[in-house]
């Protein structure tokens, strides 16, 4: 579990000189994000003044973290890179593959049996290549990273979009697809378009019912799911320093929901307290020596409008609790407006379930504040009206809250304590009756609430709110309950009211754990056998994708024109499909099954142009593949938002889709498409989306001249023989064009170029 204090000291040793030089070059005070980025330039990258949102820059991350559902594909790719061990400290975390049903003990045993093959593979491949392995039940990747590995001023990447959680400890932590992680694990640089910067100034102080969660729910409401694209969000101000480190983690975590590259906070006392409580006093000692480099320059905080591309100010003293949803995390409703909004939109008022957990909100502080509401309910004699489930963030948290009586208090209210894992947050929830598809409401402290995400039921209206609000709403059983103003009837019919939640930021008796669930890798793994059975349905060794044949793509069919929201959950659904994350051909059977076909407004029903019949998207695409006919996918705004899962890019690649043409992309998905040798294009004129018809055949006219900054011309031939020429933009630079030509980025690594 060693947290690499030597590596951290090395980062701090070189940081001052690099940052001072950058400040000189740039010629003005620097923000925190700029300091961390300039301190992590890849050796040989010239330190110049980079243009935000324009220059691609090579960086040297300090760490890599992978979770089980994405690690399988990442490590299957890494096995092709021909390396003896990982070049930077890397960990793998088993958290996504555990189904929540009856409670931790039984559920974990079931997962260990059902996914044995996958866990064994991940354990052996980690052992083989020098990767730290966190066993099933050890906790959720981002809580474990915060507790053990994150450090102020560091740069890390992780194969999960919520890697950004580590910003709570003053890092720049960025979610990427597996192929990006493979580059860094192989000792190569990692490329990122120099981000623009959004400043969020927090004034005042959280109080009463408001929690850190409300800050990000409010920011999501302001910026929307695409407002943070290409940006790092930097939080500062008295409101920032006055909140806990795990609270900062919550805010950074959900930065993924606004599409932000990452979010971060300057080094402060809350981080010192957290590092010390988690056994890392030596990181505090080292960080204190360079503390000036771990926050922005004072001038930036004094005149933020001069240094950020966009500035938001939130007064925490006036902030209300928010309840965001349903179906999208940026639809924010302050608690005082919920009665009106719920009635207006016909949202089911009755709350069926309250779920507390996920990487976003499963810290000790979260659990302790939520249980303060539960304890009040017991004292006031209220039987909760909804069911309750919790997922502690890590075994260390679980063990400590058990010791401190928090679990017992939850259980007294009939709460199910699920495994320290993602559980319902990623559809790993065997919810009774979900298959009936009834319209219903649940409230949770997670980050995402896309349709079908938690229980597979498209009619479940999931609302995101803070853990303490989840507790209050679930106990009252009503979505429109406002604990600040409303009374409740207790079991004796008396009117009672909750007092605001309270709790400990950190356990007063310290954290404790018996077995954290960590397995250190073999000192020399070269003799470790990594086994993948050829007839496995869960794991499949990868075959390299075919290189580009150098010709224009012609005669391509339109596979689907997706309408509206098309997240990675729509492109490659999670839940039951998670079990195929290591088997590309099997998981390809979920390709785009959640996307809405713009021509018939149905999901998973597209016209097979060869037969004229409607059929499931993967089946139609397999028919095109069998006939050797290329195809393209068309999409709407912010296509591929949400997760880092590269399956959403690999599945179409595997099944023969050549290009994805959309109004706009989410960052990670766009990179994933490029890495896998696909063409990710955007409409030069968004209105051209409307010109695309169901029976179109597409010809590329100038792919042979594919070059950075040069538009590509596509000819859409309609059924009646008429044609539309559509101009498309792309963001490929020279090396990314090489990936396309080679068939994938990995093909290039494998040839050693
Ligand atoms: C998610 O929250 O959607 C996930 C599951 O953690 C994903 C990663 C994955 O698809 O495995 C993410 O956010 O990147
Ligand atoms: Fe797991 Fe949910 Fe966090 Fe994704 S968002 S890492 S599924 S807990």
Image (tube, helix red, strand yellow):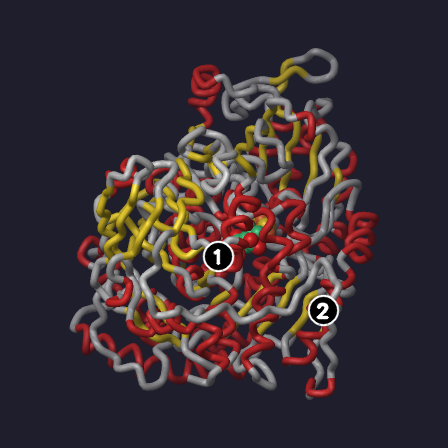
Image coordinates of residue 679 in percent, x first then y, are: 37, 59
Residue behind mark 1: 628
Up-down: is 57 above or below 710?
below
Given residues 639 and 42, the one toward you in this image is 639
Q: Is residue 435 left or right of residue 329?
A: right
Q: Is residue 388 above or below residue 567?
A: above
Coordinates of residue 21 in the picture (x, y in percent): 24, 81
Q: Can residue 192 be seen in this view?
A: yes
Q: Sort mark 2 into few (<14), some (14-19) or many (20+) by Cα contacts within 10 Å.
A: many
**What's the residue at 46%, 44% (across, down)?**
567
Q: In front of the other: label 1 or label 2? A: 1
Residue 465 appearing in the image: no
Q: How far apart are marks 1 and 2 (CA)?
A: 34 Å
Q: Is mark 1 on a helix, strand or loop?
A: loop
Question: Badge 1 local density, few (<14 within 10 Å), some, or many (20+)?
Answer: few
**Number of marks in the rendered image:** 2
Q: Position of residue 105 (x, y in %)?
A: 82, 50
Q: Quickly name the residue at label 2.
A: 121
Quadrant in which the N terminus is drawn? bottom right
Q: What element carries label 2?
A: helix
Decide which of tag 1 and tag 2 comes sooner along the chain. Answer: 2
């Amino acid at each position: 579990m060693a947290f690499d204090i030597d590596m951290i000291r090395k980062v701090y040793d070189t940081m001052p000189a690099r940052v001072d030089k950058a400040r000189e070059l740039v010629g003005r005070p620097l923000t925190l994000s700029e300091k961390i980025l300039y301190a992590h330039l890849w050796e040989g990258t010239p330190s110049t003044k980079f243009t935000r949102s324009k220059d691609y820059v090579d960086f040297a991350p300090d760490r890599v973290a992978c979770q089980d559902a994405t690690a399988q594909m990442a490590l299957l790719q890494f096995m092709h890179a021909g390396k003896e061990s990982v070049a930077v400290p890397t960990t793998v975390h088993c958290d996504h593959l555990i189904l929540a049903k009856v409670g931790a003990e039984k559920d974990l045993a079931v997962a260990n049996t059902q996914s044995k093959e996958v866990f064994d593979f991940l354990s052996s491949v980690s052992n083989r290549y020098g990767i730290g392995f966190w066993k099933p039940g050890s906790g959720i990747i981002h809580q474990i990273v915060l507790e053990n590995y994150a450090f102020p001023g560091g740069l890390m990447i992780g194969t999960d979009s919520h890697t950004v959680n580590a910003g709570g400890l003053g890092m720049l932590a960025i979610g990427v697809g597996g192929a990006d992680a493979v580059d860094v694990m192989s000792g190569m640089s990692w490329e990122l378009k120099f981000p623009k910067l959004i400043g969020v100034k927090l004034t005042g102080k959280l109080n009463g019912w408001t929690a850190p969660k409300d800050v990000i729910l409010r920011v999501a409401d302001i910026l929307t799911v695409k407002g943070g694209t290409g940006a790092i969000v930097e939080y500062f101000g008295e409101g920032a320093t006055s909140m806990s480190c795990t609270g900062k983690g919550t805010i950074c975590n959900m930065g993924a929901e606004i599409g932000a590259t990452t979010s971060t906070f300057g080094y402060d006392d809350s981080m010192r307290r957290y590092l010390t409580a988690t056994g890392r006093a030596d990181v505090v000692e080292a960080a204190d020596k360079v503390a000036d480099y771990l926050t922005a320059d004072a001038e930036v905080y004094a005149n933020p409008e001069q240094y950020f591309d966009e500035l938001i100010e939130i007064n925490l003293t006036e902030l209300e609790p928010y309840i965001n949803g349903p179906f999208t995390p940026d639809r924010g409703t302050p608690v005082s407006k919920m009665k009106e909004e719920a009635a207006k939109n016909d949202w089911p008022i009755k709350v069926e379930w309250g779920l507390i957990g996920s990487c976003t909100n499963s810290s000790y502080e979260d659990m302790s504040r939520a249980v303060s509401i539960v304890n009040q309910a017991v004292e006031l004699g209220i039987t909760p009206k909804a069911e309750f489930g919790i997922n502690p963030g890590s075994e260390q948290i679980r063990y400590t809250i058990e010791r401190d009586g928090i679990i017992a208090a939850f259980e007294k209210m009939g709460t199910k304590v699920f495994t320290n894992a993602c559980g319902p947050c990623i559809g790993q929830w065997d919810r009774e009756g979900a298959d009936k598809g009834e319209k219903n409401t649940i409230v949770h402290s997670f980050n995402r609430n896309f349709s079908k995400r938690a229980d597979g039921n498209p009619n479940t209206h999931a609302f995101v709110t803070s853990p303490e609000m989840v507790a209050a709403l679930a106990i009252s059983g009503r979505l429109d309950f406002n604990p600040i103003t409303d009374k409740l009837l207790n079991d004796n019919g008396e009117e009672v009211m909750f007092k605001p939640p309270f709790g400990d930021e950190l356990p007063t008796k310290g954290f404790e754990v018996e077995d954290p669930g960590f397995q250190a890798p073999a000192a020399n793994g070269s003799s470790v056998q990594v086994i993948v059975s050829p007839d496995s349905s869960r794991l499949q060794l990868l075959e390299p994708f075919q290189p580009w044949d150098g010709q224009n793509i012609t005669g391509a069919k339109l596979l689907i024109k997706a309408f509206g929201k098309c997240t990675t959950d729509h492109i490659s659904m999670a839940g039951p499909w998670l079990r195929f994350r290591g088997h590309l051909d099997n998981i390809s059977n979920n390709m785009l099954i959640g996307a809405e076909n713009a021509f018939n407004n149905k999901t998973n029903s597209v016209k097979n142009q060869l037969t004229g019949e409607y059929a499931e998207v993967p089946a139609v695409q397999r028919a095109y593949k069998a006939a050797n006919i290329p195809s393209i996918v068309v999409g709407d705004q912010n296509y591929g938002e949400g997760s880092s899962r590269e399956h959403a890019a690999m599945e179409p690649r595997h099944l023969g889709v050549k290009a994805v043409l959309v109004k706009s992309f989410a960052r990670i998905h766009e990179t994933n498409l490029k890495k896998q040798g696909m063409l990710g294009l955007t409409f030069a004129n968004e209105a051209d989306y409307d010109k695309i018809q169901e029976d179109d055949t597409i010809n590329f006219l100038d792919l042979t001249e594919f070059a950075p900054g040069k538009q590509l011309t596509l000819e859409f031939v309609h059924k009646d023989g008429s044609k539309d020429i559509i101009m498309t933009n792309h963001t490929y630079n020279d090396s990314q064009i090489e990936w396309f030509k080679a068939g994938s980025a990995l093909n290039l690594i494998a040839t050693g170029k």
